[in-house]
Structure formats: C-alpha cells, structure tokens
Image: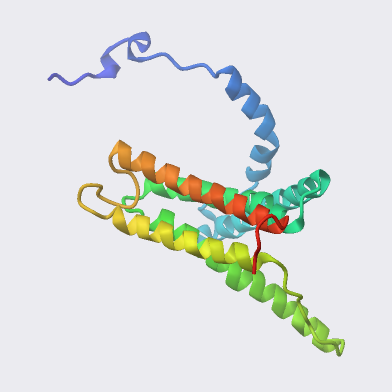
Amino acid sequence: MPEINCEDDDDEECGEEKLPSCFDYVMHFLTVFWKVLFAFVPPTDYWNGWACFVVSICMIGILTAFIGDLASHFGCTVGLKDSVTAVVFVALGTSVPDTFASKVAAIQDQYADASIGNVTGSNAVNVFLGIGVAWSIAAIYHQTKGKDFHVEPGNLAFSVTLFTIFAFICVATLMYRRRPDIGGELGGPRTAKALTTMLFISLWLIYILFSSLEAYCHIKGF
C-alpha cells in the first residue's frame, strides 16, 4: 500500500482543524480559574525538575483541601452524618486527583504497575502519614500541656471491615485477569473490561449503601 504524504497535498485534503464545540467552550470557562492557577507551576527545566515537583505537590494539596472542605460543607448542608459524608463526598473529592493520575499512568505506561501502584501508594500515604503525622502532632501537643490524648471510637469499624473485604475481592480480580485469555490487569477483551468495570463500580456502590445503612442504624454494626 503506498505511503500517504500530507506534505504533497493541500491543507484541506490533509484534514481541517476541528473547531471547539459548545461543550468545549463551557468547560473552558468553568475551568479557566484552575488553568490560570496551575499555569504558575514552573517547568521541569528548573532545579532538575524539583521546582515543578514541589509546586505541583503544593497545588494538589490546595486543590484536595478545597474539594474536601467543599464536600464537608455540602454534607452538613443537606443534613448527612459525618461518617456518611466522609465515605461518600470527602473520599470521592480527595480521590479525584488520584483517579486522573492513574488514568494518565495507564495510558502512557507500558505496564499497569504505575496506575495500580498509585492507588495503593496514595492510600498508604493517607493512612501512615495523613493519620500518623496528625495524631503524633496532637499527642505531642497534649503532652506539652500535661494532658492525655484520647480519640473516642466512632462507627467506622463496620465500613473499614467492609472496605477490607472488597479490597481482597479487587486484588483477587486483578490476579485472575493475569490469565492468558485476558492478558493483564488493565485492558483486554471488551467483555472482560466491561465485567471488571461493572464489578468494581458495584463494589463501590454496595460499600456506600451498607456504610450509610449502618450509620443510620438500619443495619447493626460492630
């Protein structure tokens, strides 16, 4: 088959430039503030990329705090309990940057290690640093005041246990997808992709449903 060279043809034959749609204009005006804000992130040429890394981390932290605070205020406005707001809106809002990071890693990398490792790594940071550092600072502060630092147990034991069970199901699904007929953790045949997507989304919806029912005492927790 002969090679097609667009340089020898007219611009109209090679393809016209696609004009932005109405949806593109709407999304541009809705996100123009964030575009201008993140335009202040320095390029990777400065300080061997460290300037870009540090400023990007700060920007992501600001955005995550903004989304989390907005989700908390929304839950308080509509009258949801704190535990339901935490597992639904706050968790969803703070996980949006991780979702896009995993998507970019899945598209650009040859293997699924980066996209899946981003999920486990972000949760490890949330648990070990997000909780550990905050509680350590609080414990040191109360110790300097001569007081004991106590955190009363809430009703998250049920949702955490349910999350752990569903996490094992997700890991088992990823391991099953390594079979030769599927070929890997991500991608694969259309049927396998659709079934995996529906399974993971169903687990998330079931997790939210049961956690909410337990928070409002419709089912007994522990």
**Relative to 179, 117 lies left or right:** right
- Residue extending farthest to the left is 1
Q: Is residue 37 above or below residue 2?
A: below
- Residue extending farthest to the bottom is 146
**Looking at this view, is 128 or 10 the one in front?**
128
**Looking at this view, is 119 or 5 the one in front?**
119
Q: Quadrant of residue 142?
A: bottom right
Which quadrant, please, contains the N terminus? top left
- In this figure, which colouring scheme has been used for the structure? rainbow
Residue at 76 percent of width and 48 percent of height: 75
Q: Quadrant of residue 16?
A: top left
Which quadrant, please, contains the C terminus? bottom right
Residue 43: tell me if it is visible: no
**Looking at this view, is 14 or 209 the one in front?**
209
Measured from the top left, where is residue 201 in percent x and y? 49, 45
Q: How many marks?
A: 0
**Looking at this view, is 125 or 82 the one in front?**
82
Measured from the top left, where is residue 10 in percent x and y? 33, 9
Residue at 42 percent of width and 57 percent of height: 170
**Relative to 214, 112 lies left or right:** left
Measured from the top left, where is residue 178 in percent x and y? 27, 55
Residue 117: tell me if it is visible: yes
Q: Is residue 100 above or below residue 143?
A: above
Q: Is residue 38 above or below residue 20?
A: below
Residue at 20 percent of width and 51 percent of height: 180
Measured from the top left, where is residue 80 in percent x and y? 77, 50
